[in-house]
Image (cartoon, grey):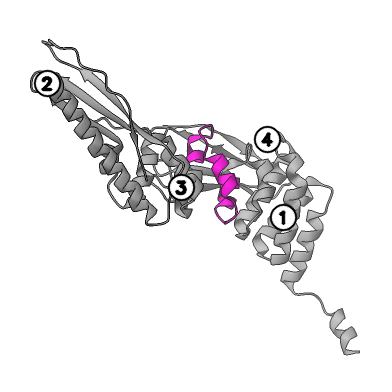
Amino acid sequence: MLANALSAQPLPVSAQQAERARQLLNSVQWVDKAWGAYLAGRLHSADLDQALIEQFRLAMALRDAPSYAEEHWFVAALFDAAIEAGMTVPAALLEPFEEDWADAVLILLARDKDGEDSLLRFGLEKSRPVVWLAANNLLFERKSQVWYAATLAQISITHRFTVTDSGYGQGIGDGAGGGVSGDGVAALPKGFPPVALYTLQDGATAQRGSVLLAQGPQNVYYKRTVVPTDEQVPFGSGSVALDRMAIRIGYLAQLRHESVEQTERLFHSETHILFTTVEDFERQVERDMEAQAEGIRALIQDLARVGLSAPDVRLRIVPEVDDQRQTATARLPAVAPRAIPLQ
């Protein structure tokens, strides 16, 4: 009798809402499924997390639906629900969405300790600048060995020798980044629940209310833009220009806890030589390139002490000779690249 009485009692409100969300997720109507995702994302129920993960599996075929289609907005609602719920979606389920939903995918990958392979794909040169930056910042925070080796291998190492026969001054120029706006309008299909769209931003373009995603030489944030039911809102992903080489230098500087300027001078050295004789020129070039090589070896050894190693990376200094002499009487000899033995 007691069991019958208990079973006849109404479910708690949260349980009723969870059951309603589950029913809507299983609907054949995209608008209903979107409402199911909307409810599930705000209930923070572990059971519903599993239901949302299953929807990601079913939604793989919808990843490139056009932006006016209901299917597209269901996928947007699904990502919004997962991000709002604070859940972790397995990287393997997110992989099919990497091309068309990169910003939202990276937000979710930031929570997944097993997402390194996906982050490494996003960290390739072909990625949008802010996507590249976000992925590399996340790998930097995790001190990924694979990422470290790839980053080290991609840094150019140069030594520029400017040769004059009189007093001469020089400076090192800085790279600059800039933003490009790409604003448009977003509108939901009729009857859809409010859906948030997510866009990544670097530190220069982040706005009030943006959320920090990953720290690095330039931090990455994300912005959440809510598209209300049956309304239009301005929306644009925008873009930013980055000096990727400077960012790579910045990672090494932060890992070693030294200034970016100091690390930049180490990898991209500049020397002014007041010409006297060919023999003196050759001696100074040899001495300065050896000092640069030793400095880079010391940096790599310091990073090895904190657990980062890249045994298969081969580094070399590429010299550049700028002959600015006004009364040259002897031709300068060619300077060969110098390998940097790391062992």
Residue 12 percent across, percent down from the top left = 75, 74
Q: Position of residue 88 (x, y in %)?
A: 63, 57
Residue 142 within the magenta-colored segment of the rendering: no
CA gap, disc 4 and disc 2: 64 Å
Q: Nearer the viewer, residue 329 or 240?
A: 329
Circles 3, 1 touching at the beta carbon (< 8 Å): no
Residue designated by label 1: 53
Q: Is residue 207 left or right of residue 333?
A: right
| Crowd band around label 3 with a 10 angstrom C-alpha radius: few (<14), some (14–19), many (20+) | many
What's the residue at 28%, 50% (across, down)? 258
Q: Which residue is mark 4?
A: 67
Q: Residue at x 84, y 83 (%)?
A: 6
Extent of the magenta region: 104-133
Mark found first going from the N terminus, 4 or 2: 4
- The residue carrying pointer 2 sits among few (fewer than 14), some (14 to 19) or many (20 or more) residues within 10 Å by Cα, namely some
**Residue identifier under label 3:** 137
Q: Which mark is residue 267?
A: none
Q: 38 or 296, which lies in front?
A: 296
Q: Amino acid at mark 2?
A: Phe
Gap in Å between the C-alphas at discs 2 and 3?
A: 44 Å
Q: Is residue 71 left or right of residue 8?
A: left
Question: Where is the N terminus found, in terms of image quarters?
Answer: bottom right
- x then y, percent, for residue 31: 77, 47
Q: Is residue 112 magenta?
A: yes
Residue 275's disc number: 2
- Which residue is depicted at the point 41% across and 40% down? 152
Above/below status of 210 relative to 281: below
